[in-house]
Image (cartoon, helix red, strand yellow):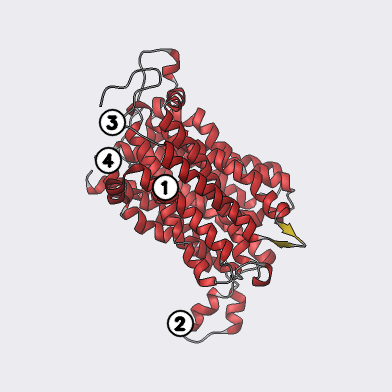
Amino acid sequence: MNKSVRFKLFLMMVLEICIGEGWYALIFGYLPSLNFTAAQQTWILNGFPIAAIVGMFFSNQFADRNFAAERFLAVSHVIGGVAMIALAWVTSFWPFFILMWIHCLLYVPTISITNSIAFTHMKDAQKEFGFVRMGGTIGWILAAWPFTFILVDWARVKELNPQGFTNWLGTVLGSGLTGQALQEGTKWTFIVAGGASLVLALFSLTLPHTPPKRVEEGPASAKFAWLESMKLLAIPFILILWIVTFIDATVHNLFFNWTGRFLGSPVAAGGVGIPGNWIMPVMSIGQIAEILTMLILGVTLKTLGWRTTMIIGILGHAARFAVFAFMPQHKEIIILANVLHGICYAFFFATVYIFVDEFFPKDARASAQGLFNLMILGLGPLAANAVGPKLIGETFLKNGVVDFKGLFLIPCAAAIVAAIVLALFFRPPEKKEPQMAGTPAPAH
């Protein structure tokens, strides 16, 4: 892969992930300010995981077999970007709900499509995907840190009139918006994310051509890429990985459901006591660590193999939740524990994407990516959204105080179980592309 193509794929990932992360972190506090009920908030937030499920059965197949991937990307981001920008001026439920679902239904499938475009133009995925996917990590960081400066109470900064750059910077970072002012400022997240979507729509037209992979003949089911992907679940090692991916994705999303509240809660209430405008930067430390982890992913895979690398990634979740459960009084250790996100993501999720590219038939890889995105972006988040609020808001809430220790031990235990299952039952063959279900595999 030449340098020009590699840079384009890298920049594609920067923009792709920046779009999704630009609005997500702050929307949990924004929706209540619009007086939406809990049920209405759930419907809006579930647009993202449900879009992953819908994409599995339509958009990924459509792009895989009927549409040039880069053109599908462009069209999706034009419409989705306009819908996202419009959210900044909408305050009633039904328009907000419709616009958010339009955006999600068009955006989520592009995550699989960008992976498909990247893998199509790589010569050695194990060596090259780490650098390209690192663009997504940088996109996440770019989406998080600027708002530390955008969402600032500049009137207070002016009033304090700090002298010197160091004092000025400290005052700015310590003067985050609060209350209604913060909610008003949150509108900028939709504008920035929508703008990035429109930029990617234009940039997609410069990406290397990735033609559709048509099926000319064969049984009717062969014309549906997602059906071919589903048939591969009859192969034991793929089914095991799919189930483990569900557990890991649920645990992963429980981290995002609970960590903001944990970090911001007072020490007396079992939390860490981190100021509100620093919660997003603290959580983004994991993304910075991910950059380094992605750089060594190729070497790690070649040295340790698929199974061991994935097990380390899963146990990263267990270690992080264990630190949260047993060391909340040690603020520095809690902050440092977010470094484990790099291991959790790269060593499991990114490895799964590479594994799928290696083992699935060439003409259905985008839909195969969608099959695992069904768990990573769909069923896992749905499960987390279903149990997360109840656990933190009812089960482990006593006299207005959350029992964070008991809460965090649940996903910690789940991650350990998933790692054990993978260690005992995940046995992929040496051959890269397995035979379809129902056909004999060749001798090794």
At numbered mark 3, what does the secondary structure look like: helix, strand or loop? loop
- What amino acid type is highlighted by mark number 3? Lys
Q: In which quarter of the image is the C terminus?
A: top left
Residue in view at x 42 percent, y 23 percent: 228
As rendered, which of 367 and 396 lies closer to the eye?
396
Q: How far apart are marks 2 and 4 (CA)?
A: 45 Å
- What amino acid type is highlighted by mark number 2? Phe
At numbered mark 4, what does the secondary structure look like: helix, strand or loop? loop
Reading the image, the residue beneath label 4 is: 122
Reading the image, the residue beneath label 1 is: 311
Comes first in the chain, label 4 or label 1: 4
Q: Quadrant of residue 382?
A: top right
Q: Distance between the residues labelled 2 and 1?
A: 46 Å
Disc 2 vs disc 3: which is toward the camera? 3
Reading the image, the residue beneath label 2 is: 165
Residue in view at x 48 percent, y 50 percent: 19
Graded by Cα atoms within 10 Å as few (under 14), some (14 to 19) or many (20 or more), the crowding at tag 4 reads some
Comes first in the chain, label 1 or label 3: 1
Disc 2 vs disc 4: which is toward the camera? 4
The answer to whether residue 274 is above or below residue 313 is: below
Comes first in the chain, label 4 or label 3: 4
Disc 4 vs disc 1: which is toward the camera? 1
At numbered mark 2, what does the secondary structure look like: helix, strand or loop? helix
- What amino acid type is highlighted by mark number 1? Ile
Q: In this view, does 237 lie to the left or right of 261?
A: left
Residue in view at x 54 percent, y 59 percent: 322
Q: In which quarter of the image is the N terminus?
A: top left
Residue 431 numbered mark, or none: 3
Q: Distance between the residues labelled 1 and 3?
A: 21 Å
Q: How far apart are marks 2 and 3 (CA)?
A: 59 Å
As rendered, which of 69 and 141 lies closer to the eye?
141
